[in-house]
Amino acid sequence: MKKPIVRKVRCAIYARKSSEEGLDMEFNSLDAQREACSAYIASQRSEGWVELADQYDDGGFSGGTLERPALRRLMADIEAGRVDVVVVYKIDRLSRSLMDFARLVEVFDRHGVTFVSVTQSFNTTTSMGRLTLNVLLSFAQFEREVIGERIRDKVAASRKRGMWMGGFVPMGYRVQGRKLVVHEPEAAIIRKIFERFLKVGSATTLARQLRAEDLHSHRGRVIDKGSLYRILRNRVYVGLAVHKGAAYPGEHAAIVSQALWDKVQSILRESPRVRACHARAATPALLKGLLFGPTGRAMSPTHTRRSGKLYRYYVCQAALKGEVTDAQIRRVSAASIEAAVINQLRVLLKSPEVVMATWRAAKAEGGGFSEATVREALDRLDPLWEELFPAEQARIVQLLIQRIDLKPDGLELRLRTQGLGHVVQELGTFLRAA
């Protein structure tokens, strides 16, 4: 009499542990779960059950999410038709979320895969089995939410006592013995940021300066405008522990004084648009002392505000003093004249005559640059210009231009040859790097 042919049933064991604690032990929770599942599969050998060699273990992953590497690998094998039965120690090892579990069961059904819990015996192919599964899973989700509430209450109580409860470590601190301690090299940078913002009054300007200085955070990232705002508003720097908007005295030491903090916050409370106007008003006038009108008299920078907007001008001296003048040009827009001067300067710096004059000046100063190198330096000054902050732009203009004569039909620029040579010397680092 022939024995009936038993179809081979491929069984995949899935194990999970929420925390990483104890995973480095020789025999841990994942091993215990897998051993119990293996024994169950062995008891079903007469039914053709065979354990797959692949191990699907997620150590240190919460059951409240499906973003787990081993689970993703298991689902991929199910969709590829390599698995017939999924075996777990308890159903909450697969998921603690009712909605997530419903999605998983839907995938199981679509590919003809059954689900077995070693400690909770039921069959998902029947309506009663599905009801039992949903009841058990509801309790698993309830347990997870109760645990979450307990953890949140513990964190809130600890924060009220000023304790550090983990998470992102602010720049300027290190964690030692589950406490924040001041890391002085970074703390000095934080203090400098607060002090410089107090002087500059603009996060945009300060971010540009820090980028020019190649200053990075403790994670190696560029300190941009967004990072600056997060630093300047982080109350941990005055020794406070913050939880859900409320601040409590912290166990850690402060990095900045309360007086400095209060001054910075008073600036931040001001409208960014108003602060931008203040910053622009404090910006050095690009053509101060260089611009002369048709009568030969200097034109001085001035500004006015209307409807909250800042308007900058260059006005002839006679008009400023209230003198009667027949000057054809009494006032020009600062933005327009500065843009025209910069555009004309860019054209001149590329002319062969200026390149030769600059090369001779740089050679006289002992720079040892070739003509090609000087031409490259002047070419590099063009894209570099936008990266410079206003004070540096004004300094370079003062070096390059001797005088600007404003005429009814255009502009006349006189360059400083020695100034061109000096600028090329300052670009030496870029030249030699090339």
Image (tube, rainbow, N blue to C red):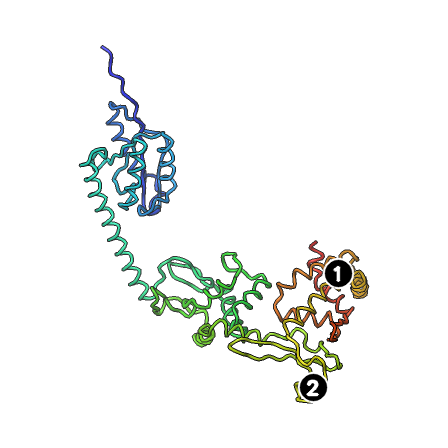
Quadrant occupied by the N terminus? top left
Q: Please name the residue shown 27% across and 20% down the image.
A: 6
The percent position of residue 143, horizontal first and vertical second, equals: 23, 49
Q: Please name the residue shown 65% across and 71% down the image.
A: 336
Q: Please name the residue shown 64% across and 74% down the image.
A: 334
* Type of amino acid at the residue the image marks with label 1: Lys
Residue that numbered label 1 is attached to:
350
The percent position of residue 397, horizontal first and vertical second, equals: 69, 70
Return the residue found at the far bottom: 323
336 or 86: nearer the eye? 336
Separation of marks 1 and 2 at Cα, in angstroms: 36 Å
Answer with left or right where residue 42 lies relative to residue 172: left
Residues under numbered marks 1 and 2 in contact, where contact means CB atoms less than 8 Å apart: no
Category of crowding for the residue at label 2, using alpha-carbon neighbours closer than 10 angstroms: few (below 14), some (14–19), many (at least 20)? some
Return the residue found at the far top: 1
Say what secondary structure mark 1 lies in.
Answer: loop
Front label number (1 vs 2): 2
The percent position of residue 33, horizontal first and vertical second, equals: 28, 37
Q: Which corner quadrant of the image does residue 125 belong to?
A: top left
Tally the numbered discs: 2
* Type of amino acid at the residue the image marks with label 2: Ala
216 or 309: nearer the eye? 309
Category of crowding for the residue at label 1, using alpha-carbon neighbours closer than 10 angstroms: few (below 14), some (14–19), many (at least 20)? some
Q: Please name the residue shown 52% across and 62% down the image.
A: 224
Say what secondary structure mark 2 lies in.
Answer: helix
Quadrant occupied by the C terminus? bottom right
Q: Which corner quadrant of the image does residue 416 belong to?
A: bottom right
Pointer 1 or 2: first along the chain: 2
Q: Is residue 254 above or below residue 116?
A: below
Label at residue 47: none
Residue that numbered label 2 is attached to:
318
